[in-house]
């Protein structure tokens, strides 16, 4: 502690969570503030600033989420009933680390965001990823974006962005969590939703899966063969990509339409337009559903 401030620091341990900030130093400096100012938050080195609407913190504020702010206020209240202090949070090297996050897309510039919903790390829950999808949707809606696209990976994301000429803010890094994205967009609709992915992930969606991770199961090649109408030629393929090569363009169209039906069940009631696009490993379009509105549950198309 110095005469003009108090400083506390901790090295973040993210446990099993896949977090780029694992091992980062988080430092908080508290200084006296102006009389009557209350608790004021400042972004130090490596902490970003919010520049776009739609996040829990308004533009112009440090990217320190409401829960961490409340936790800090409660800790300070244990010392003083109505403290007038400036709380500066810094994460040395955070600006470089932020380049490996979605912050730039969300409009958080200059560093990392201080997140948190409970203050406790839950080992490898998928909540953080799904929450980032929700925040991306919030920003897109707040900026008046009418067409968003959720992609399973970088290749499909780049391909769908080019296909539709979408702005970066319209791109939701869905990953394997198509169900998490669609459920949120059902409650917070946009005019047009596109789902984009590779042949294997979109085949899993077509077969009824809303979590596309490999741990949730592999593609049912017998079902894929039945969908293709080519029987053993497809069923005996070593990979989904090989099955698509054997079956030709027809299979991509059928997978996209079957995936649309599954996705529409989850998005039902939103009134959004929905389409599914399927890309191969090079980003070439190999399947595409029609673009049509989602209405009530079990009333698709």
Image (cartoon, rainbow, N blue to C red):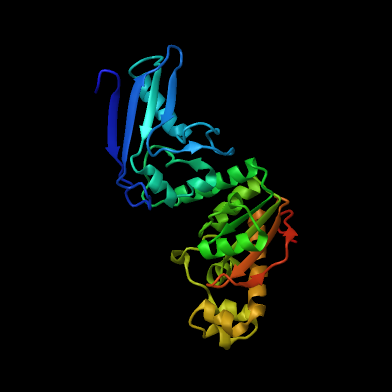
Q: Nearer the viewer, residue 11 or 96?
A: 96
* Count of numbered circles in the view: 0
Q: Is residue 39 above or below residue 276?
A: above
Give the x, y percent position of residue 298. 71, 59
Q: Nearer the viewer, residue 159 or 263?
A: 159
Instruction: Say which residue appears at 58% left-offset and 54% top-offset.
Output: 171
Q: Quadrant of the C terminus?
A: bottom right
Q: Is residue 57 above or below residue 85?
A: below
Q: Is residue 92 something that shows in the picture? A: yes
Q: Is residue 300 something that shows in the picture? A: no
Give the x, y percent position of residue 72. 39, 27
Left or right of 40, for residue 198 = right
Give the x, y percent position of residue 11. 28, 41
Instruction: Say which residue appears at 58% left-offset and 68% top-offset.
Output: 202
Left or right of 130, for residue 162 = right
Give the x, y percent position of residue 116. 43, 39
Instruction: Say which residue appears at 36% left-offset and 35% top-offset.
Output: 90
Q: Residue furthest bottom?
A: 233
Q: Nearer the viewer, residue 206 or 50?
A: 50
Q: Residue furthest top?
A: 35
């Amino acid at each position: 502690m110095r005469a003009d401030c108090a400083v506390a620091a901790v090295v973040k341990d993210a446990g099993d969570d896949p977090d780029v900030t694992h091992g980062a130093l988080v430092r908080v400096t508290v200084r006296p503030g102006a009389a009557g100012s209350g608790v004021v938050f400042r972004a130090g080195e490596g902490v970003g600033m919010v520049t776009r609407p739609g996040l829990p913190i308004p533009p112009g504020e440090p990217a320190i989420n409401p829960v961490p702010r409340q936790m800090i206020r409660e800790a300070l209240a244990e010392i003083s009933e109505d403290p007038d202090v400036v709380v500066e949070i810094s994460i040395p090297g955070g600006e470089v680390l932020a380049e490996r996050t979605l912050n730039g897309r969300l409009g958080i510039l200059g560093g990392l965001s201080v997140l948190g919903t409970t203050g406790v790390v839950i080992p490898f829950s998928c909540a953080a990823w799904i929450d980032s999808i929700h925040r991306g949707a919030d920003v897109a809606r707040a900026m008046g974006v009418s067409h968003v696209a959720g992609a399973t990976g970088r290749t499909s994301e780049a391909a769908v962005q080019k296909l539709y000429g979408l702005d970066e803010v319209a791109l939701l890094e869905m990953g394997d969590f198509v169900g998490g994205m669609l459920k949120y967009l059902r409650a917070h609709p946009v005019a047009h939703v596109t789902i984009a992915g590779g042949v294997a992930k979109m085949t899993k969606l077509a077969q009824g899966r809303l979590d596309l991770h490999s741990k949730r199961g592999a593609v049912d090649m017998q079902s894929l063969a039945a969908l293709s109408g080519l029987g053993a030629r497809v069923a005996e393929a070593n990979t989904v990509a090989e099955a698509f090569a054997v079956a030709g363009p027809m299979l991509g169209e059928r997978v996209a339409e079957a995936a649309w039906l599954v996705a529409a069940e989850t998005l039902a009631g939103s009134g959004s337009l929905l389409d599914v696009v399927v890309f191969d490993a090079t980003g070439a379009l190999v399947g595409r559903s029609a673009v049509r509105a989602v209405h009530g549950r079990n009333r698709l198309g």
